Structure formats: structure tokens, C-alpha cells
Image (tube, grey):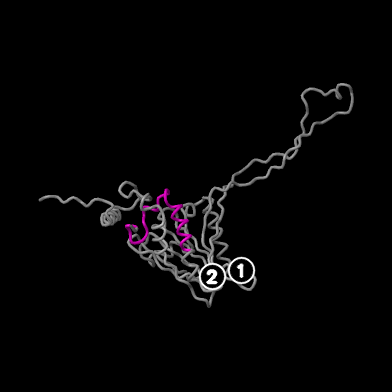
């Protein structure tokens, strides 16, 4: 049974499911891109370690200790011995708390490999202001803005701050109302971003993933990748549509639409008819 929704399934935004959805989507995006890319391009999955940095007090490398009682040498006027404690070398290794995975597209140039495009699916922590993952993601955005690399940002989460590179202020009055979107930054057209807005009612878009100038782009069907994620994942068995709450919550009008979709799919009982 496919997902009961035409595009994004809002139940899968729940923290119980999102990590698995994210990682499967990355896998199936890479799987879809690989045969579509012209040689010598190729797609590969990469990851970014999320580490927590904490303030730590520093201690001296060497401590000089004196015994509380005089030593025999001190009692009899001999040489004074000072006990020196040898301290071990303390190496701080920040704890890895999570990993973000993403798809990178490379091309071979002689004996070198060149990063051409990076494809990110945003996680809740990427969109949480001040979170370590958010800070690292913002750093990646800034690094890419200074480099000849395209960035494709896929936001399938209604929770959190607007984080993709096109400012929300630039979209007001330009883009239609949207709940999800894809933002494509093209390094060879730095002032022209490709923006794909969509809602729960819409199929996930097919986007143009840019390659090097002169090589065009390759199409990525996000709906096909999502359908594969849903079909091969545990969601048709694990999601209790009749019991679970959607997080974050939807408006009453959108919840009416969700219930209608669930009834059509046979996941909720039909509305009982009232006898006249």
C-alpha cells in the first residue's frame, strides 16, 4: 500500500520516524542520480559529524606537592626532597552525538576529483537556532557561497526556522503559500536561486540538479525517491494513522484534508451518516 498522501506524508515528520526517513531518502536520491549522471560524474554519500563542544576548566600540567609531615631527610638536615606528581596528557575528544548524511556529486578531472554539487535534506537540528548542527550547517552554507560548488537544499519539515539560503523576506509576495520547499544555489548564477515551493496537496517536485557550466543539469524526481522510501521502509506497518498526532500540528482546515485522505485510503472509518 502506498502512502495515503500525494506528496509528503506529514506523519513522517514526527521525531520517531524522521531520522530513518532522512537517511533512506539520501540513499534513494543517490541511487536515482547515479545512472542518470553523464560520465565522468558520479554521486556518493558523505557525512558530517555533529559534535558537542563544552567549556572545560584547564588544570596545570604539573603539580608540586609537599608532604604534611617532614621527611626523614628534612628531620636530619639532609637534602630536601620535593615530590613532583607527573600528570598524564589530557586529550579532549568532543563526543560525536549525531551525523548528518548528504549526497555529493563529483566529476573526474584528470587524476583529480572535483566536488560539483552537494545535496542536503534538512533535519530538525539543522533548523534549530543555536544548535551545534545548525551552526555547522550554517558554516557549510557560507563555505559553499565562497566556492564554485552548487548547493541543493531540500526542506521537508515544517518545524524550526527558515534555514535555506533564500531569505524568507525575499519570498513574501513572490512565492505562493508553501509548507515545504527546495532551494538550489547555482555557483555560476549566484544571484538567481531556483526555488520549488509546495504543500501537502502537491506531489514532491522533480528538480534540476546543476552540473558544471556547459554540462547542463540532471533531473531528480523527489516524489519517486520518497515513494521508494515509504515502500521499502517500515512506515505502512509502523505509522498508526488512527492514533498518532501530527508534529508539528496542522490547522483545522488541513487536518480535515488529512482525515479525508486517510478515509479514502481506508485508514480511518467513513463518517457515519446521520439519519433525517
Q: Residue at x 69, y 39 (%)?
A: 59
Position of residue 268 measured from the top left corner of the image (x, y, whole percent): 26, 51
Residue 199 lies, in percent from the top left, at 35, 61
Q: Which residues are magenta?
A: 3-29
Name the residue tied to disc 1.
113
Per the rendering, the mark at residue 189 is none
Return the residue found at the far left.
276
Q: In the rendered image, which residue does mark 2 sit on?
A: 187
Rendered position, 187 above or below 271? below
Q: Residues within 10 Å of mark 1 (few under 14, many from 20)?
A: few
Name the residue nearer the viewer: 200 or 103. 103
On the image, which quarter does residue 266 sit in?
bottom left
Q: Secondary structure at mark 2?
A: loop
**Mark 2, other Cα within 10 Å: few <14 / some 14–19 / many ≥20:** many
Report the number of discs. 2
Residue 120 versus residue 74 in the image, above or below: below
Query: Foreground residue, 263 or 175?
Result: 263
Answer with mark 1 or mark 2, whichever residue precedes in sequence: 1
Dots 1 and 2: beta carbons under 8 Å?
no
Q: Residue 246, how many percent across, how many down?
A: 35, 50
Extreme bottom residue here?
A: 214
By secondary structure, the bulk of the magenta-drawn segment is best described as: helix
Give the CA separation, mark 1 to mark 2: 18 Å
Q: Nearer the viewer, mark 1 or mark 2?
A: 1
Q: Which image quadrant is residue 88 in?
A: top right
Q: Residue 233 appears at what percent x and percent y? A: 41, 55
Amino acid at each position: 500500500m502506498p502512502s495515503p498522501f500525494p506528496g509528503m506524508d506529514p506523519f513522517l515528520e514526527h521525531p520517531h520516524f524522521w531520522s530513518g526517513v532522512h537517511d533512506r531518502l539520501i540513499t534513494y536520491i543517490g541511487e536515482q542520480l547515479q545512472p542518470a549522471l553523464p560520465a565522468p560524474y558520479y554521486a556518493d554519500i558523505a557525512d558530517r559529524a555533529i559534535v558537542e563542544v563544552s567549556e572545560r576548566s584547564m588544570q596545570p600540567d604539573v603539580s608540586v606537592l609537599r608532604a604534611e609531615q617532614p621527611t626523614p631527610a628534612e628531620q636530619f638536615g639532609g637534602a630536601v626532597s620535593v615530590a613532583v606528581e607527573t600528570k598524564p596528557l589530557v586529550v579532549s575528544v568532543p563526543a560525536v552525538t549525531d551525523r548528518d548524511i548528504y549526497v555529493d556529486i563529483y566529476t573526474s578531472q584528470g587524476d583529480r576529483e572535483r566536488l560539483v554539487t552537494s545535496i542536503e535534506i534538512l533535519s530538525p537540528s539543522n533548523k534549530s537556532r543555536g544548535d551545534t548542527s545548525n551552526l555547522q550547517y550554517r558554516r557549510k552554507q557560507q563555505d559553499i557561497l565562497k566556492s564554485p560548488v552548487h548547493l541543493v537544499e531540500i526542506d521537508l519539515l515544517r518545524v524550526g526556522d527558515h534555514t535555506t539560503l533564500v531569505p524568507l523576506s525575499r519570498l513574501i509576495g513572490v512565492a505562493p503559500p508553501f509548507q515545504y520547499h527546495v532551494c538550489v544555489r547555482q555557483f555560476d548564477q549566484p544571484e538567481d536561486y531556483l526555488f520549488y515551493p509546495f504543500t501537502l496537496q502537491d506531489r514532491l517536485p522533480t528538480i534540476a540538479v546543476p552540473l558544471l557550466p556547459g554540462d547542463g543539469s540532471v533531473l531528480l524526481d523527489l516524489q519517486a525517491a520518497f515513494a521508494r522510501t515509504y515502500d521499502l521502509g517500515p512506515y505502512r506497518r509502523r505509522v498508526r494513522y488512527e492514533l498518532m498526532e501530527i508534529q508539528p500540528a496542522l490547522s483545522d482546515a488541513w487536518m480535515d484534508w488529512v482525515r479525508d485522505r486517510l478515509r479514502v485510503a481506508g485508514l480511518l472509518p467513513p463518517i457515519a451518516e446521520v439519519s433525517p
